[in-house]
Amino acid sequence: MTSADPPLNYLSAFRDGALAASLAEAIQKAALARPRYAFMEFCGGHTHAIARHGLVDLLPASVRMIHGPGCPVCVLPIGRLDMALDLALSQPGLILCAYGDCLRVPASGGRSLFQARAQGADVRMVYSPTDALALARTHPDRQVVFLAIGFETTTPPTAVVIRAAAQAGHANFSVLCNHVLTPPAMDAILAEAPGGAGLDGLVGPGHVSTVTGSGAYEAVSRRHGKPVVIAGFEPLDILQAVLMLLRQVNAGRAEVENEFTRGVTAAGNRRAQALMEEVFSLRDTFEWRGLGEIPRSALGIHPRYARWDAEARFSLPYRPVADAKACECGAILRGEKGPTDCRIFGTACTPETPVGACMVSAEGACAAHFHYGRFRPAPVAAAGA
Amino acid sequence: MAGPSPKSASRWTLGRPLDLRHGRVEMSHGAGGRATTQLVETLFQAALGEMGPRESDDGAVLPPLAPGERLVMACDGHVVSPLFFPGGDIGCLAVHGTVNDVAVMGARPLYLTASFILEEGFPLADLQRIVASLARASRDAGVPVVAGDTKVVERGKGDGVFIATTGVGALPTGRNIGGRQARPGDAILISGTLGDHGLAILAQREHLQFASEIVSDTAPLHGLIDALLAAAPGVHVLRDPTRGGLATVLNEIARQSGVGIDLDEAAIPVRADVAAACELLGLDPLYAANEGKVVVVLPAEEADAALTALRGHPLGRQAARVGTVIEDPQGFVQMRTRMGGRRLVDWLTGEQLPRIC
């Protein structure tokens, strides 16, 4: 690119219909080599983009996309949400801050943070952990707790506020930490889940990888002999990643490739990684909704920052809670079933009255199918079906 | 000693004149006494002039309609935040919102009423700006405010100013436009770019800066609709896609008429800066609010004439044909995406963007 070239329009450049058509044609050709391919898009952001742009229509019938568990709200187990609810309802004057997505998620007994708010708990929606810390500053006489959730993308901002609270000595601020890690979840899916065994490859996370770097998936890819292609969230990114996966499978390769080079490097964001090292420590094990206990898959707050750890401060016990009986979120998060395989999809479980977490978050597989795909006469088949 | 002139009599009755520069709304301004009269005379009547109520009676007496014409009424409450935004303010919005609700019924807007709910402590200078804007919009639209009301609520119980307006219009004989009239095969047009109002408000609220300022499209649509109906008298449905945007309006029409709708994403006009702001804020322009656009559903054979008429009007330069009504008992609104795939354009769910109009 010379200086005379106009700047790249990031909004339209990756949504070019003609380029999409030529990529679709290349995918059609590449997919002729085998009768069937099954790829999982790990991220909810990819699930959303596939549905929003109708990308399934551009793929041949032999290429199936299976929704993965990469939706932070969806994998938060009910028991952890209960901890936040109990905290908000039992501690007088406490302000619980959470991302908007968390407020409607059903906890045990049909409760939710929204409901707790109606019952008088002070639950606030924040856009960023710094908003929560600001609340702690303006209410020095009240306890302020931030309900931290998410993968490696949202972890560094949480680390920033914990360190800032420690530096400023804010004794009334703490974090209920539920941060989880992508590579161990990928490993679990490829190792254990029946859906995982039938997978030919993974579309790897985009935003997460800006922090972790593409190198973070080398071990998983090698151990299971599956290709991983890191992809951006624009429709052309996803199509290109599918083409790269097809070419790897056809050539018998199983490598980590990076389609999202404008955002992701091999090493990732070293400053963010160093900050995470300093503030968090690896938990021995952590429960994921749908995936169960996964060893060394989540972060707790490092003992050196224990004063800002809500679990320690309020001595919160963890009690695991089973999903609602009719809800198939677990199987959907493991990639074993699709949204329409669930009996209550679109009937008892809708975005207005969600039963399972996959219907709550915009990144959830059920919400994506409800909003964008419900008109399709044939349900999207699940893996192995 | 000669008798007092009317002007000095008024001054004697009302005491000290209103301080429009530094004064603030007080509870007494809504109590119905002298202070209320003073506020109405020096602020509202002065701005509205011939577009305001003629007498200080409790109601307006209006002339009869032409034979065969039917009455159309619409009302709209305005709670927009911020009160002033690029391209307009709550004053002109209160006129346009209701004038447009009457106009999309196919009626000629005739009269408005305006009810102001003011919060104690609100600066009179801001109120004066809002009333001046309302008066200007009323004059430009040619629709007088024939009755009004002012109330004051205690500080903390309102948010500056709320304005509720009611509009009355005359529906010509034989005209039958409404949400139940869409038929399979009908063409769907939009009079211009989507989401300008919603994003102008949000950009202001979120302090977003873009290369060019996003300006609200707030405007009265009855002139544009006149031109449209003259060229395409067979129009089946007209709607102004305000809260909830184009997607919501089309879902309403599909449900009312028992039809499906097929949209073409590539044909839908969206300004580049609005599209960029939507991406940043995680919004979809299909659901963003408009205050100066009309959705037209009409027989396909009239679509070209209608488009020409819309594009010939200053408010319809970017009018486009964006879709077709199809048979679908389930009433889905579908869209062919720019990528060449298909998706559903569903009802809005979850938290709406509050206080957009």
Image (tube, helix red, strand yellow):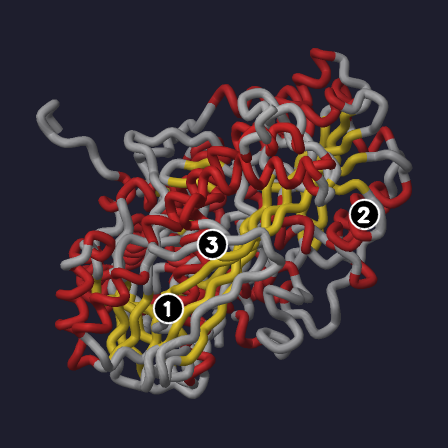
Q: Residue B131, image x and y in percent? A: 48, 40
The residue tagged 1 is B104
Q: Which numbered disc, 1 or 2, marks the residue closer to the eye?
A: 1
Q: Distance between the residues labelled 1 and 2?
A: 47 Å
Q: In percent of the image, x 61 and y 29: which residue is there? A: B11
The image shows residue A185, relative to residue A178, as above or below, that is below
The residue tagged 3 is B145
Q: In percent of the image, x 77 and y 17: which residue is there? A: A170
The image shows residue B71, relative to residue B81, as above or below, that is below
Quadrant of residue B322 in the image? bottom left
Mark 2 neighbour density, 10 Å: few (under 14) some (14–19) many (20 or more): many
Q: In percent of the image, x 23 and y 73: which residue is there? A: B229
Of all chains, the one bearing label 2 is A
The disc labelled 3 sits on which kind of residue? Val
Quadrant of residue A299 in the image? top right
The disc labelled 1 sits on which kind of residue? Val
Q: Which numbered disc, 3 or 1, marks the residue closer to the eye?
A: 3
- Same chain, labels 2 and 3: no
In contact (CB < 8 Å): disc 1 and disc 2: no
The residue tagged 2 is A85
Q: Could you tell which of marks 3 and 1 lies nearer the N-terminus? A: 1
Mark 1 neighbour density, 10 Å: few (under 14) some (14–19) many (20 or more): many
Q: How far apart are marks 3 and 1 (CA)?
A: 19 Å
Q: Is A48 left, or right, of A337 in this rendering?
A: left
The image shows residue B212, relative to residue A332, as above or below, that is above
